[in-house]
C-alpha cells in the first residue's frame, strides 16, 4: 500500500517496512504514510474513517497489523477478527504487514436506524 504497483510487486515485504500507521480515535480514523526514501520525495498519505452521521454513540476499535487481524492458523476467508466479537487490538505505528480495519459496535433500539460515513482517501 502507498507504493506503485511495480514497486510493491518487486519487493512487497521490503515495501511494507516503510509504512507507518496512526490511529486517530477522536476522528474514528486511521491514517497511514510511507516514510520518504529521499529528502525530495513527497510521501503519500492514506486515511480510512468510519464515523456516525449524527454523533450516535458508537464504540470503535482499530487494526493496522495484518497478522493480528488474520490470526495464527486462520485464512483471509475466515480471519480471527471476524470470528471474535471483541475489540480489535488498536495497534499502530510501524508494523511488519500493514492493513487498515475499523470495527464499530453500537446498540440500536427496535425500529431505530443509524447512518455511518465510511471514507477512504
Image (cartoon, rainbow, N blue to C red):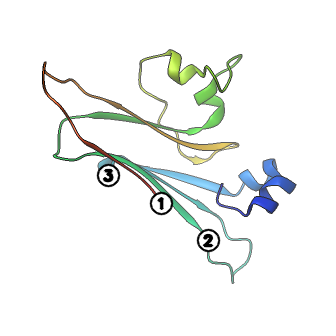
Q: Counting other residues with Cα less than 10 Å from the Cα at mark 1, is it few (<14), some (14-19), or many (20 or more)?
A: few
What distance separates the C-alpha of mark 2 from that of mark 3?
22 Å
Q: Which mark is residue 43?
A: 2
Q: CA distance from mark 1 to mark 2?
A: 14 Å
Count all numbered tags in the image, as a single digit.
Answer: 3
Closer-to-camera residue (32/49): 49
Q: Can you give x and y, in whole percent of width and height, for residue 76 in the image?
A: 66, 27
SS at circle 2? loop
Q: Are marks 1 and 3 in contact (CB under 8 Å)?
A: no
Q: Which mark is residue 73?
A: none
Q: Which residue is mark 3?
A: 27
Q: Is residue 21 left or right of residue 15?
A: left
- Label 1 SS: loop
Task: Name the foreground residue: 70 vs 26.
Answer: 70
Q: Is residue 66 left or right of residue 59?
A: right
**View extreme (front): residue:** 111
Point out residue 35 in the picture as x, y percentages from the top left corner. 65, 65
- What residue is rendered at 49% in x and 31% in y? 89
Which mark's residue is nearer the viewer, 1 or 2?
1
Mark 1 — residue? Answer: 121
Farthest bottom residue in view: 40
> Which label's residue is closer to the chain start, 2 or 3?
3
Amino acid at each position: 500500500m502507498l507504493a506503485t504497483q511495480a514497486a510493491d510487486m518487486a519487493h512487497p515485504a521490503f515495501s511494507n517496512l516503510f509504512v507507518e500507521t496512526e490511529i486517530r480515535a477522536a476522528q474514528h480514523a486511521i491514517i497511514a504514510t510511507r516514510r520518504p526514501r529521499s529528502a525530495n520525495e513527497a510521501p503519500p498519505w492514506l486515511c480510512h474513517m468510519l464515523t456516525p452521521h449524527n454523533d450516535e454513540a458508537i464504540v470503535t476499535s482499530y487494526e493496522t497489523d495484518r497478522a493480528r487481524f488474520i490470526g495464527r492458523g486462520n485464512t483471509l476467508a475466515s480471519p480471527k477478527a471476524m470470528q471474535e466479537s471483541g475489540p480489535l487490538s488498536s495497534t499502530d505505528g510501524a508494523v511488519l504487514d500493514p492493513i487498515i480495519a475499523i470495527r464499530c459496535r453500537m446498540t440500536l433500539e427496535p425500529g431505530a436506524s443509524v447512518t455511518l460515513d465510511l471514507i477512504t482517501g
